Image: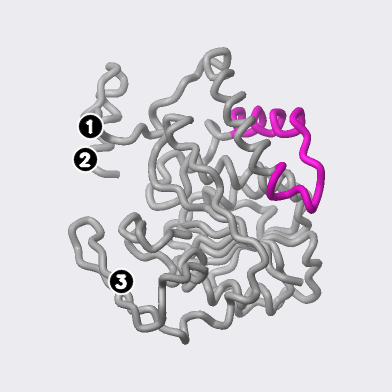
């Protein structure tokens, strides 16, 4: 826990904050009166309805009442998450979209690559109660939450044999800071067709993350990014650079049928922070 978080924890009890410019933290500052969050829940449901109505229309009909009910579920669930301070992992916005997407897709098999403290492992277990869930990470030293309903593996997901995979009822969630083109190829070769990527930054936002999986899917589809291009940025004052290589593409571009970023709801919800979660559908 950082010194700033400790100080803010004390000041928040007095209704104060160390810095008014710091993004509001959903772990310590949020409305607890359901009647006062009703307008926000309605607005978020409308945004979600529009997004899913456009991008899941080929899979199922998404109803207004259904989406509103799921938003209500999420707002009831999220304050009880086991990892209150998930710095370095998914926050309110990503968890919101991850929960609703899983509830709507109703996958029978879910793969999570990148566990961190277990926040999204918990969320997946809540959203997909009937699914078989496999969570992978090279190190589980920071794990806070572990579920008996989730099979947790201290290894890279690419070394696991899932057997036969139903592409229509299986979902992969990648938050592992590994080359995203490689993950697309690995998923396709194993029979998965529906993918979610965290930290799928466009090239102009690479400064938002210390170690994104490069190239990101967004970069892979960016026609202005060419093999041999050197991309440089600063992250927390430190110089970073990456040279885009054709070998990094893993011939993944032609495997992507649809790629779309989830809407940014940080400004609407009041819980800010960079959020670049994307939905990727692969070709059959």
Q: Secondary structure at mark 3?
A: strand
Q: Please name the residue shown 57% across and 82% down the image.
A: 251
Residue span colored magenta: 53-77
Q: Is residue 68 in the magenta section?
A: yes
Q: Residues within 10 Å of mark 2 (few under 14, many from 20)?
A: few
- Looking at the rendering, which quadrant does residue 185 occupy? bottom right
Q: Could you tell me how far apart the alpha carbons at marks 3 and 2 are, in whole angstroms?
A: 33 Å
Say whether marks 3 and 2 touch (CB < 8 Å): no
Work out whether 143 lies above or below 24.
below
Q: Please name the residue shown 54% across and 23% down the image.
A: 40
- Pinpoint residue 97: horizontal percent, then vertical percent: 59, 44
Which dot marks residue 3?
2
Q: Residue furthest bottom?
A: 247
Q: Secondary structure at mark 2?
A: helix
Say whether marks 1 and 2 touch (CB < 8 Å): yes
- Pinpoint residue 163: horizontal percent, then vertical percent: 77, 76
Q: Please name the residue shown 59% across and 68% down the image.
A: 153
Is 131 left or right of 120, judged from the image as shown?
right
Judged by depth in the image, the label closer to the viewer, 3 or 2, is: 3
Q: Could you tell me how far apart the alpha carbons at marks 1 and 2 are, in whole angstroms?
A: 6 Å
- Pinpoint residue 66: horizontal percent, then vertical percent: 76, 33
Q: What main secondary structure does the magenta stretch of the protein show?
A: helix
Which dot marks residue 231?
3
Q: Secondary structure at mark 1?
A: helix
Q: Which residue is mark 1?
A: 7
């Amino acid at each position: 826990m950082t010194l700033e978080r400790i100080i803010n924890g004390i000041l928040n009890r007095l209704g104060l904050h160390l810095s008014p410019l710091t993004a509001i933290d959903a772990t310590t500052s949020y409305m607890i009166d359901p009647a006062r969050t009703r307008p926000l829940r309605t607005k978020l449901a409308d945004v979600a309805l529009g997004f899913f109505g456009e991008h899941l229309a080929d899979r199922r009909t998404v109803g207004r009442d259904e989406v509103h009910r799921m938003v209500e579920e999420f707002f009831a669930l999220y304050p009880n998450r086991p990892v209150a301070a998930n710095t370095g992992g998914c926050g309110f916005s990503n968890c919101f979209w991850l929960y609703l997407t899983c509830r709507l897709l109703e996958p029978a098999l879910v793969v999570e690559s990148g566990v961190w403290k277990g926040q999204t492992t918990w969320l997946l277990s809540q959203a997909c109660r009937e699914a078989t869930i496999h969570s992978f990470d090279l190190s589980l030293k920071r794990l806070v939450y572990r579920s008996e309903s989730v099979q947790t593996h201290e290894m890279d997901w690419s070394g696991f044999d899932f057997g036969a995979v139903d592409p229509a009822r299986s979902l992969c969630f990648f938050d592992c800071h590994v080359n995203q083109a490689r993950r697309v190829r690995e998923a396709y070769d194993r029979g998965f067709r529906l993918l979610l990527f965290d930290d799928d930054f466009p090239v102009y936002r690479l400064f938002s993350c210390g170690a994104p999986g490069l190239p990101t899917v967004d970069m892979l589809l960016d026609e202005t990014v060419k093999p041999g291009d050197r991309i440089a940025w600063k992250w927390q004052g430190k110089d970073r650079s990456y040279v885009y290589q054709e070998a990094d593409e893993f011939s993944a571009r032609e495997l992507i049928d649809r790629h779309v970023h989830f809407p940014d709801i940080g400004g609407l919800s009041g819980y800010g922070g960079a959020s670049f979660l994307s939905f990727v559908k692969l070709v059959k």
